[in-house]
Amino acid sequence: MSEYLLEMTGICKSFAGVHALSDVNFAVRPGSVICLAGENGCGKSTLVKIISGVYTKDAGKVVFEGKEIEHITPAEATRLGVQVIYQDLSIFPNLTVMENLAINSEITAGQKIVNRKRWEKTAKEALSKIGYEIDLYAKMGELSVADKQLVAICRALLFNAKLIIMDEPTTALTKKEVDALFTTVRQLKESGIAIMFISHKTEEIFEISDDVCIMRNGKNVFSGKTADLTKDDFTYYMTGRRLSNQKFVPENISKEPVLKVTNLSLRNAYQNVSFELRKGEILGITGLLGSGRTELALSLFGLMKPESGDIELNGQKASITSPMAAQKLKIGYVPEDRLTEGLCLRQPIADNITLSSLKRLSGKFGILNHKRIYEDAAIWVDKFSIATDDPHKNASTLSGGNQQKIVLSKWLSNDLDVLILNGPTVGVDVGAKEDIHNLVHSLANDGLAVIIISDDLSEVVQNCNRVIVMKDGVISGQIDEDSITEENILEVIR
Ligand SMILES: Nc1ncnc2c1ncn2[C@@H]1O[C@H](COP(=O)(O)OP(=O)(O)OP(=O)(O)O)[C@@H](O)[C@H]1O
Ligand SMILES: [Mg+2]
């Protein structure tokens, strides 16, 4: 018998002529953690969808526990013990934890009569398997992402999972939650379950994975032990280039602030927030989830109304009552949850990129100039290496990370005074991350005032010339240019 639980060889998959996977090999041992890594659009999710029966492969061989599986359907994958925990977590938000845990097993067992006692027993068993405690009667929709994820893992265990696949599981988690998730992952591994996880975060990959499989453009570039790689080699395999990770050096910061916030307050969100932002600056705002940083950003973009305090733009008192008002004042905001807030999936890629600069791209009488839209879009597709062969295609054909890139370019292609970026590189691969950072540096040096909200401390340190730390809704500290280090920021956060 083979040492592998799952062995895939020569896997090919194309979408309308685009080779998403060409001759890919992938293998997982039981009781191990393997990370699948690679730039946005390299084919990671496609490979997962083949394993789980969502897509049918064009060619190649899949062997599970020594037996070749000709046709994988979602039901067959479940029967084999393959469970995927997608980012949307496929939960029923209006049902309780217990109902979510029990619902699938009830259906599979062919039980039609609802038996509360049995449901409760099933749910409790699942939770105890990973030593996780939660109120069984809490509504799923009200749980944190981290809790939802643990419930989803328990549900996978109820299906006797042998292989649990997690597609970017740590994206919306805080550091503490990531640690808790990793503890669970180690427990699962001990019990003989294989874990495959997709991530763009180098630190996490090195912390948790035994093996790594790196792909580029739908092909294998490295498969082997994580310990045999250095972090530099790892990014080199992913991107095909050596990254410089240049630190932001402000070139000309204006004397007068472009944005001045005084004593801004909103109950249950933030209190007495005051700060100034100058042209040419990149100001970092960091703090734990729930520190009020996102609510503050939403208020600056007219999506939340502060109760008291003042906002001044270029020396003039401003009343930002709506996103439209904010845009008129040349304020741009790139939301954290870009996929739901910033994108029209059923519109062409090019239209998405140029959406907020349509005015600039229309001719006399406001008639859209399609040629210019596509010319403009082509520049951004190239700048960010957005993986598409044709910007006329709908945004839904792009991989997750590439969708993120178009939302960003939509704003960066605009004429703005202040740009607020909330988690600008969440879900974006290391190569694109560097491209985005460099671009923001040059925009700042051309006179844009930028706010980066991020809990990725290395991102804040590398890109900001000033950092504000928020805690429980108030500014708990500010760190200036020379003393911006991860240690100093952590000191204030704690
Ligand atoms: N349903 C689809 N129709 C057309 N093209 C698709 C479809 N799904 C994926 N693709 C293309 O296949 C390639 C691989 O996409 P995939 O989603 O597997 O990337 P990924 O590695 O998961 O990227 P990310 O890190 O951004 O999530 C991309 O070029 C993508 O545009
Ligand atoms: Mg993906």
Image: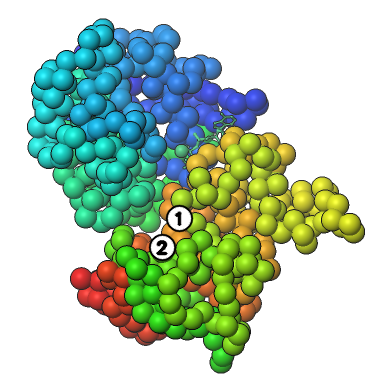
Front position in the image: 51 or 59: 51
Q: Mark 1 or mark 2: which is in front?
A: 2
Q: Residue at x 45, y 21 (%)?
A: 54
Residue 476: horizontal and vertical position, in percent?
28, 78
Badge 2: how crowded within 10 Å, few (<14), some, or many (20+)?
A: many
Query: Mark 1 belongs to which amino acid?
Result: Glu
The image shows residue 285, relative to residue 344, as above or below, that is below
Residue 368's place in the image compared with 438, above or below, is: above
Residue that sits furthest to the front in the current view: 307
Q: Quadrant of the N terminus?
A: top left
Kind of residue indicated by mark 2: Thr
Give the residue at mark 2: 294
Report how many numbered discs are placed on residues in the image. Answer: 2
Relative placement, left or right, of 325 versus 224 is right
| Element at label 1 | loop
Q: Quadrant of the C terminus?
A: bottom left
Q: Which residue is mark 1?
A: 336
Q: Tell me, yes or no, whether the two marked residues, 1 and 2, touch with CB atoms within 8 Å.
A: yes
Residue beneath the point at 63% across and 67% down: 325
Question: In terms of image quadrants, where is residue 480?
Answer: bottom left
Name the residue at 53% across, 66% down. 301
- Mark 1 or mark 2: which comes first in sequence? 2
